[in-house]
Amino acid sequence: MRVLFATWAWSTHYYPMVPLAWACRAQGHDVRVASQPELAPVIVGTGMPAVRVGRDLDAGTWYRTRINPMMDYGADAARTPEERRARDRERHLTSLGLYAALMEAMAEDLLAFARAWRPDVIVHDPLTWAAPLAAQEIGVPSVRNLFGPDIGYWFRPEGEGVLTSLMERMDCKEPNTLGDLTVDPCPPMLQADAPVARSRFRYVPFTGLSAVPPRAHERPARRRVCLTWGTSTDRLTGEASFLPGDVTAAVSALDAEVVIAITARQRGMLPELPGHVRVVESVPLDALLPTCDAVVHQGGGGTTLTAAKYGVPQLHLPQLPDQMVNSRHLASTGAGVLLRADEASYEQVHRYASDLLAPDSSYRAAAAALAADIEAQPPLSSVVGTIAGLAA
């Protein structure tokens, strides 16, 4: 079987597909990964053959100049119901515009490669709409690879008019972005109830290639809290949003050992820290989080699922639309708390983080139940067989 994986050029949208791509190759299937040129070194670094398609697009600038100004949820309280609905509609269309632009940047080259290589199936990030278009045009199944609660089900372009001009130029009909199958690492407790053909599998963390420091798996004598901000938020919203001062101070004041997990790129953005706060760079979260009693983070899909896998209670401080969705679903399980970033005062962060750490906290029991839900899902290898059957 020839399997073409496709994603737009953002590592945290590619990484959730890497375990499945590895599993396909391990079972003898021929794999290619197509993305914009910017992502090619990342793809090669994960051991996959990269195919460059289309042109790069500065998603960070798009977010900062067009989408972020729409994320003024704190002002909604002063708006009438009609004004809130209008603002939500404006937010929705503005966000759709980014992914429509990404589709336009990739579609023609991706379709040309698909026609030449003739994959049996195309597996794709749920927001990379060029992939189901290519699958439609060459007559093969398309498979969405989710990375958390299914934002792609509620956030899709069909009927919105954002793809009309591109489809006319390419002489194609608008694709079904939900595809023929959805492969899903998100446990049922955390997932949205969307009527799609679904194949579940047990979540496998992957956050890039990294070295695990010695003794990283040893639990400390004191309770430990991890504070992390992911790799995307500051790139999309600007450095001023990275680990805001009140958040850092409130977590540092907890009666616990505090570990701030960052990338090397983010080191210069840190504020001055108390001496007892430990900073680690590029440590894989699946090595660090099993030793933690709570995690405070931005609500990204990878951090959310990795913390859930290890039964760690979570405090989410979302700033981006997908983070808000993840956070709402996590809060609904009882395994964590949603505190919007614009509400994250020192007092609120300290209070909720302290609640997560309480030995008899309900959050701990709910987090354990969520971890059990993940463990109960089928192994990843079963999904490869399902995809092969679909392709056949």
Image (tube, grey):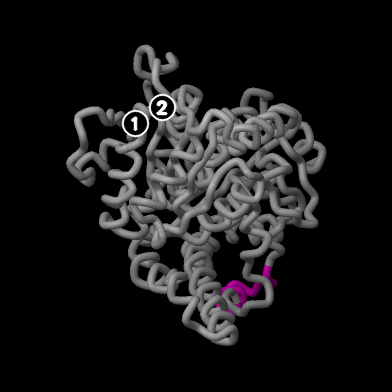
What percent of the width, then of the height, locates residue 320? 46, 59
Check whether the beta carbons of the residues at disc 1 and disc 2 lie within 8 A of each other: yes
Q: What's the residue type where badge 1 is placed?
A: Val
Image quadrant in which the C terminus is located: top right
- Disc 2 packing (10 Å; few <14; some 14–19; many ≥20): many
| Magenta stretch contains residue 169 | yes
Residue closer to the observer: 186 or 56 = 186
Residue 118 visible at all: no
Secondary structure beneath label 2: strand
Label number found at residue 250? none
Residue located 34% across and 60% down the image = 237
Q: Residue at x 53, y 48 (%)?
A: 337
Instruction: Report which residue position mark 1 lands on.
Output: 258
Look at the magenta stretch and give its main secondary structure: helix
Q: Is residue 194 above or below residue 187?
A: below
Q: Position of residue 189 (x, y in %)?
A: 71, 43
* Residue identifier under label 2: 224
Residue that appears at 62% across and 57% down = 151
Q: Element under label 1? A: strand
* Residue at the (21%, 34%) spot, across then down: 274
Range of residues picked out in magenta: 164-174
Q: Does residue 148 appear in this view?
A: yes
Residue in front for this viewpoint, 163 or 280:
280
Q: Amino acid at mark 2?
A: Arg
On screen, residue 282 above or below 135: above
Q: Position of residue 192 (x, y in %)?
A: 70, 53
